[in-house]
Image (tube, grey):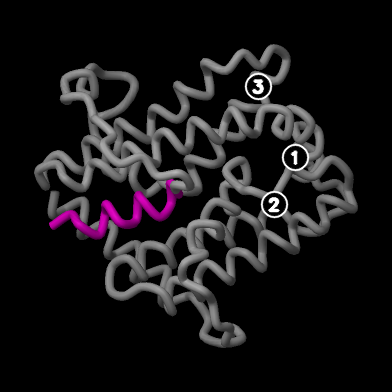
Amino acid sequence: MMTRKFSLIIAIWMILTTITTSEAKKKFDCDHLTDFANDVIIVTSKTRKFPTTLPEFSTFCKQNLQLAADVTTMSKQCFKNEMKNIIALVGYSYRQRMKLLCKRSNNNSKANAVISAAPCLNRFRSKMAKCFDRTANRIAEIKSQPNNLKFPYLCCETGQIRKCIEKIQSGDCKKDLQGYIDNALEMTNGFIDRSCGEYNDETDKCDRLKPITVKNEQTNPSLIVNVAELIATIE
């Protein structure tokens, strides 16, 4: 467990040393962090949708890059110690991915792929959001588990998002939904996957863990915030 935590700390340190300090100082309402974090995932956002045209994609990119900067700034203003670093790590990872996605090119295949998948993603956005919310609530309950079981539970629960989305009756949209969840999980918890070991879909390790019971269901949960809060409790 200490090795996993140490690896995460090193990753955070390396990333934080590359973040510039020239960002404009903005004051945020820390109560809105959940909304910001959910906007990152998009399907859990109250207002955002996927772009269906090139002009919409351009606006989408501008919003994403600003959102990444805002998440990083909010992490500094609203949290201390490990929570601040973990949220900053997510913000940095998101910003790097958006820079790659939004890179200007006469033949941006990534942009075309997003625009092509957008009708399907927008159509099933609310159903996918339920999968994220369900997992976010379950991850919030893991904080009460013994320290040595927190990472195994986290690994297994994040894997449930994929299974939940795969169960959605999406017809011809199935491939687009699969592509979205692959990218979303890689961005939000790629660093977790490297620490999961045998706690994955290819073994029966997760089936051996006792089921998680959600006692206090949040009405507007955030997967990113709940994962960060959980990791901050691991000793």
Q: Nearer the viewer, mark 2 or mark 3?
A: 3
Circle 2 residue: 101
In magenta stretch: residue 99: no
Circle 1 residue: 114
Residue 74 lies, with reference to residue 27, above or below; the image says above
Pinpoint residue 23: horizontal percent, then vertical percent: 59, 83
Whether residue 152 sits left or right of residue 90 in the image: it is left
Name which residue type carries label 3. Lys
Mark 1, other Cα within 10 Å: few <14 / some 14–19 / many ≥20: many
Disc on the earlier residue, 1 or 2 = 2
> Residue 175 — which label?
3
The residue tagged with tag 3: helix, strand or loop? helix
Q: Quadrant of residue 98?
A: bottom right
Q: Label 1, label 3: how many angstroms apart (C-alpha)?
A: 12 Å
The residue tagged with tag 1: helix, strand or loop? helix
- The quadrant of the picture occupied by the C terminus is bottom left
**Residue numbers of the magenta segment:** 222-235
Whether residue 212 sits left or right of residue 1 in the image: it is right
Name which residue type carries label 2. Leu
